Image (cartoon, helix red, strand yellow):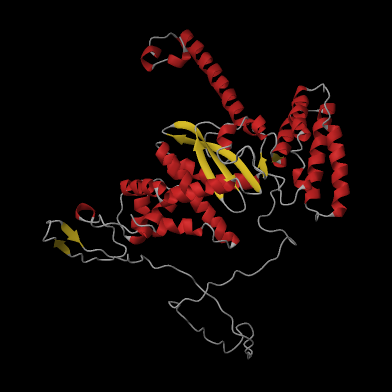
């Protein structure tokens, strides 16, 4: 009997010998499944907590900033507002420790910033005169700032742009599913809104002001001096697609496509892109269309590739990877030194040693040979040490990974996009929101208007 198909009814008909044989087969099957699960866990296919690790670190580092790293400052207090409540603390009459007299030295300040339990919604009530033309009999309605011309009848009572903007931020930026956004808004403000209304408004905004700002960001990206790009998985109607992110000092652009080829990359960065593209070693960036484009391959990715090979090697087979890893680590340390004439000679020396180590030759180990071929061709194309020869280039692609992180978190709970229109709206809103946040961080205002259009544009 097949142990996988054993049923309680059939077990009663078996003899003792047959039951013993079945138990032995089931034990062998259980042991086989345990080995398969262990192999999947070893390869990283974890099913339980997605953030769990195989083994905890024996001596973890203490959290927080290390001694001597950076400048430690006190958190600044909030700016004064007309609605501030001022409370004066009592002056101590004696020392609580010894009971001695005290002398005044200075007056300190402390603040507690809180929010109302439930802010009252601001309702604008329009009194609209409705008239009838004596000549043609047409009905004419009065107009007022903030009221849409078609706001009448079944659509006379609408939600303002601030409410819809908050709904879009909760969904597109924080990844809260659309069906749960109404519950969040109701809990915070007592404002009732439906998931359908949020979705329809998002489609209108994506076809209107947000879409216009998004297309402008896409067009401006090709003029950036440095662009970091990476991609992650997404879904459209249950189908696996690619969410691509492009990050520069001025803006952030996302796009969702069914394929990730050089054609999709060239939608944002054409073949004549004059800046530097910082990427991993994806095949999309190795196309002939990018032969004349300056690139920097992520050193962090290369170090992880080398470490993965070293884990499986012992003895002399580790020599190639250890030497290559040491050279890349030396390059990372050299990048921390101030640029100038004093750094040029060490850079040239490091480049000569790296070129020699990655020279074309045959190695005995197949994994080391793949490393040599893959990294060596990037070295031949001058895409490894660009960050040491050109100012403003980072050695890793961490910036692109950071802009994809919110989408990765949102992907776990937001169910991604139902159709291509929704995917376009997701790309547009994410691009405008993240660019606006970058503008605030850098003190810029070029694209803050695009972000405010989400809040101020009426339907």
Above or below for 92 versus 411: below
In the picture, residue 64 is in which quadrant? Answer: bottom right
Image x and y of residue 265, in percent: 58, 37
Please give left or right for residue 311 compared with residue 168 in the image: right
Image x and y of residue 378, in percent: 74, 34
Which of the image's four quarters has the N terminus? top left
Please give left or right for residue 159 compared with residue 234 in the image: left
Above or below for 377 versus 431: above
Is residue 347 in view from this perspective?
A: yes
Residue drawn at x 51%, y 83% is 89
Please give left or right for residue 315 compared with residue 412 in the image: right
Outermost residue to the front? 135
The foreground one among 63 and 352 is: 352
Above or below for 417 versus 75: above
Image x and y of residue 51, in percent: 56, 42
Q: How many marks?
A: 0
Which of the image's four quarters has the C terminus? bottom left
Is residue 297 in view from this perspective?
A: no
In the picture, residue 228 is in which quadrant? Answer: top right
Image x and y of residue 263, in percent: 57, 33
Residue drawn at x 45%, y 30% is 239
The foreground one among 36 and 144 is: 144
The foreground one among 369 and 279 is: 279
């Amino acid at each position: 009997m097949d142990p996988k198909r054993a049923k309680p009814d059939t077990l009663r008909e078996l003899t003792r010998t047959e039951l013993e044989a079945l138990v032995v087969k089931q034990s062998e099957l259980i042991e086989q499944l345990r080995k398969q699960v262990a192999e999947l866990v070893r390869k990283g296919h974890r099913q339980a907590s997605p953030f769990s690790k195989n083994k905890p670190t024996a001596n973890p580092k203490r959290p927080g900033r290390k001694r001597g790293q950076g400048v430690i400052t006190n958190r600044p207090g909030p700016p004064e507002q007309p609605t501030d409540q001022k409370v004066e603390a009592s002056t101590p009459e004696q020392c609580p420790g010894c009971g001695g007299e005290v002398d005044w030295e200075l007056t300190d300040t402390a603040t507690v910033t809180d929010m109302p339990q439930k802010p009252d919604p601001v309702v604008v009530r329009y009194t609209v005169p409705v008239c009838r033309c004596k000549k043609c009999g047409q009905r004419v309605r009065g107009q007022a700032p903030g009221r849409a011309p078609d706001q009448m009848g079944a659509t006379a009572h609408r939600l303002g742009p601030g409410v819809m903007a908050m709904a879009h931020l909760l969904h597109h930026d924080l990844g809260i599913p659309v069906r749960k956004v109404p519950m969040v808004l109701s809990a915070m403000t007592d404002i009732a809104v439906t998931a359908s209304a949020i979705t329809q408004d998002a489609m209108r905004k994506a076809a209107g002001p947000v879409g216009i700002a998004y297309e402008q960001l896409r067009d401006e990206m090709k003029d950036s001096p440095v662009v970091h790009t990476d991609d992650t998985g997404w879904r459209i109607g249950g189908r696996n697609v690619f969410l691509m992110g492009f990050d520069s000092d001025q803006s952030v652009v996302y796009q969702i496509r069914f394929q990730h080829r050089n054609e999709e990359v060239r939608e944002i960065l054409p073949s004549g892109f004059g800046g530097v593209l910082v990427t991993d070693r994806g095949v999309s960036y190795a196309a002939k269309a990018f032969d004349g484009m300056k690139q920097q391959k992520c050193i962090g990715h290369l170090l992880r590739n080398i470490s993965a090979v070293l884990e499986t090697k012992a003895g002399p087979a580790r020599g190639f990877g250890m030497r290559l890893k040491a050279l890349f680590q030396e390059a990372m340390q050299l990048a921390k030194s101030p640029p100038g004439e004093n750094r040029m000679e060490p850079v040239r020396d490091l480049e000569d040693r790296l070129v020699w180590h990655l020279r074309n030759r045959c190695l005995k180990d197949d994994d080391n040979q793949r490393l040599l071929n893959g990294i060596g061709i990037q070295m031949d194309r001058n895409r490894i040490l660009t960050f040491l020869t050109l100012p403003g280039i980072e050695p890793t692609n961490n910036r692109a990974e950071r802009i994809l992180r919110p989408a990765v978190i949102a992907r776990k709970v937001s169910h991604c996009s139902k159709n291509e229109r929704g995917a376009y709206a997701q790309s547009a809103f994410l691009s405008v929101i993240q660019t606006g946040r970058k503008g605030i961080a850098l003190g810029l205002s070029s694209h803050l208007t695009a972000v405010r259009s989400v809040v101020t544009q009426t339907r």
